[in-house]
Amino acid sequence: MENVAVLIVGAGPAGLATAACLTHLSIPYVIVEREDCSASLWRNRAYDRLKLHLSKEFLDNILVMQAKFIFGDLSRHGITMPKMGPMILKSKTGRSVVIDVGTVGLIKKG
């Protein structure tokens, strides 16, 4: 597992708010949650019509961090990360980011 500065236990309202603040401050963190979704109390027990809407920037930061962790730095192979994250890119341009993991593996092998 990667080195992280903060471990957040629980993906409820407090855990998600903490994660958002840490993201804003560029502090690495990991969230652990025993349920199969975030904000499980809201989604599964308290309100039958509540939907949790996270900002696209929050979702983008998580996706970009995951992609960097999974694929590493591909710039030496001529593949650069876009300036915008995938959610913002989709909303502004209508284009979707697609990563073919098989192709990435072959590129890394040369």
Image: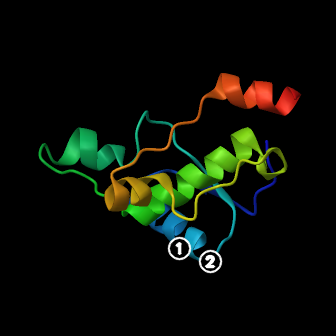
Give the residue type that dot 1 points to.
Cys
Q: Is residue 27 above or below residue 103?
A: below
Label 1, label 2: how many angstroms apart (C-alpha)? 6 Å
Please tell me which residue lies in front, 35 or 56. Answer: 56
Residue at image point 69% right, 54% down? 80
For the question of whether residue 54 can be seen, the reply is no
Label 1: how many Cα within 10 Å (few below 14, some 14–19, many 20+): few
Q: How is the image coloured?
A: rainbow
Task: Give the numbered dot on residue 58.
Answer: none
For the question of whether residue 105 can be seen, the reply is yes
Q: Quadrant of residue 8?
A: bottom right
Outermost residue, right side = 110
Label 2: how many Cα within 10 Å (few below 14, some 14–19, many 20+): few
Please tell me which residue lies in front, 33 or 65. Answer: 65
Please tell me which residue lies in front, 51 or 94. Answer: 94
Q: Is residue 29 above or below residue 31?
A: below
Left or right relative to 43: residue 6? right
Give the residue type that dot 2 points to.
Leu
The residue where tag 2 is placed is 25
The residue where tag 1 is placed is 21
Outermost residue, bottom side = 25
Q: Is residue 71 above or below residue 27?
A: above
Check the picture and name the quadrant holding the N terminus.
Answer: top right
Residue at image point 34% right, 43% down? 40
Left or right relative to 57: residue 23? right
* Whole-percent x, y for residue 69 in the image: 72, 46
Q: How many marks?
A: 2
Residue at image point 59% right, 70% down? 22
Question: Mark 2 falls on what kind of element?
Answer: loop
Asked if labels 2 and 1 touch by Cβ distance under 8 angstroms, the answer is yes
